Amino acid sequence: MKKTATAHWSGDLKTGKGTISTQSGALKEQAYGFNTRFGDTPGTNPEELLGAAHAGCFTMALSNILAEAGMVAQSLDTKAEVTLDKVEGGFAITAVHLNVEAVIPGASAQAFEDAARKAEKGCPVSKVLNAKISMDAKLKS
């Protein structure tokens, strides 16, 4: 399976502007630029999109791992916090912290924690990132 996304850019780094689109059309010419990345101008940025991809991938993986263990989540809510740091030679995404809250009728805290740890390491987006990945998992009643 292959999926595509495109980016268009005009201008220099600080005053230029761009758009990002996805094959599915979920994003169609979504604005991005220096101010949407480092300021508060409306639009998106690569770190936000990576966070969305990681949260979605992890949550789907967790759902599958739970099902394989005989558990079905009533709800899984994941937030991914992506850290962009200045490092030698420029900038790097150095960390992603996942925070998941779940409602899973009949699940034990240990079974949920085990499944969440497995998903944290096993989801395809986690595997592709060269960043520290951490996670907090909370089973709600």
Image (cartoon, rainbow, N blue to C red):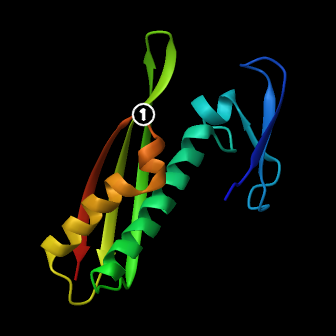
In the rendered image, which quarter contains the N terminus? bottom right
Picture coordinates of residue 101 (x, y %)?
Answer: 31, 68
In terms of depth relative to the viewer, which is nearer, 122 or 117? 122
- Residue positioned 20% across, 66% down in the render: 113
User: Is there any visible trace of residue 39 in the rendered image?
Assistant: no
User: Is there any visible trace of residue 94 in the rendered image?
Assistant: yes
Relative to 119, 26 lies left or right? right
Placement of 80 over or under 18, stated as above or below = below
- Residue positioned 78% across, 43% down in the render: 6
| Residue type marked 1 | Asn
Relative to 19, 98 lies left or right? left
Q: Which residue is mark 1?
A: 130
| Mark 1 burial class by Cα count in 10 Å: few <14, some 14-19, many 20+ | few
In terms of depth relative to the viewer, which is nearer, 20 or 42? 20
Relative to 85, 25 lies left or right? right
Picture coordinates of residue 124 (x, y %)?
Answer: 47, 53
Placement of 141 over or under 33, stated as above or below = below
Residue lying furthest bottom in this view?
106
**Which quadrant of the figure has residue 86?**
top left
- Residue positioned 35% across, 86% down in the render: 72
